[in-house]
Amino acid sequence: MIKLILSGCNGRMGRAVAELCAIQPDMEITAGIDLLGQSDREFPVLSSPAAFQGAADVLVDFSSPAALEPLLEFGQSRRIPLVLCTTGYTQEQTEALRQTAAVVPIFRSANMSLGVNVLLDLVRRTAAALGEECDIEIVERHHSKKLDAPSGTALMLAGAAAEGLPYQPDYVYERQSVRRVRDRKELGIFSVRGGNIVGDHTVIFAGRDEVVELRHTAASREVFASGAVKAARFLAGEARPGLYSMADLLAQAD
């Protein structure tokens, strides 16, 4: 039985993960973490990871960037692997995360959907094949409550496209401030916020007389919860420190 700590347990994604874990025969949530330390959940809820004194195999975090430092300290001191699903980390936080991964296994992905991670590979290969002939634009759509823009997934897709291109693209997030023709090396990234859109990402390769679009749409948060549970199961069995991603999980599936 895998004993899991769920950080951000009272949020929308935390509840989705808890519901999915409840029907997994090999998964048990041993504690939740919420800033207020209050909940109607069937497991104990603590206000900080440091307050947890029991045994656990892995921690899954769907909270906020502000929670990262105590989570890294907890993982390092207790040698408990971390699955970090939160987006919006600063460069300093990302560096702290990398340093901690030298001591404890950390799984990080800006998007826990397996489909999105397959899309990343498709974008990389399409950019390699068509990038010199096409302008590349990314449009991401999310619900009105999402705080960060562009989304972490949009930046991942931009990075995948950049890996396939023979040049380093210039990311452009808005064009209304400059009146000029689009530069050949631009890669546009644009955000839409509205309603209850779970997540929608489109990568557009616009060439002369033809357009190729690669798109992923999430119909519910369960796809992200499912990916997080798969990542927890993967990391709980990994003793080696390091920074892991969906690419490692997909490689194991192969």
Image (spheres, helix red, strand yellow):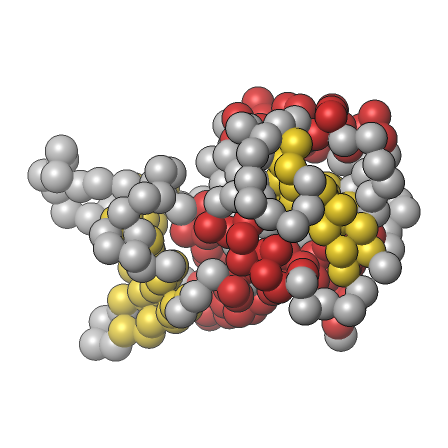
For residue 148, say whether it is visible.
yes
Q: How many labels does the image show?
A: 0
Front residue of 243 and 203: 243
Which percent across, then down, holds residue 25?
Answer: 78, 69
Q: Specify whether 41 is left or right of 210.
A: right
Residue lying at the far right in this picture: please name it.
Answer: 239
Which residue corresponds to the image point at 55% horizontal and 45% vertical from the top-left? 40
Front residue of 52 and 131: 52
Question: Quadrant of the rendered structure where residue 234 is?
Answer: bottom right
Which percent across, then down, holds residue 221?
Answer: 47, 61
Which percent across, then down, holds residue 113?
Answer: 54, 62
Q: Specify whether 45 is left or right of 182.
A: right
Q: Is residue 40 above or below residue 205?
A: above
Question: Where is the N terminus found, in terms of image quarters?
Answer: bottom right
Which residue corresponds to the image point at 86% horizontal and 55% vertical from the top-left? 237
Which residue corresponds to the image point at 51% horizontal and 34% vertical from the top-left? 64
Front residue of 132 and 140: 140
Front residue of 97 and 34: 34
Q: Specify whether 219 is left or right of 107.
A: left
Question: Where is the C terminus found, in terms of image quarters?
Answer: bottom right
Which residue corresponds to the image point at 88% horizontal and 45% vertical from the top-left? 240
Which percent across, then down, holds residue 18?
Answer: 61, 55
For residue 248, say whether it is visible.
no
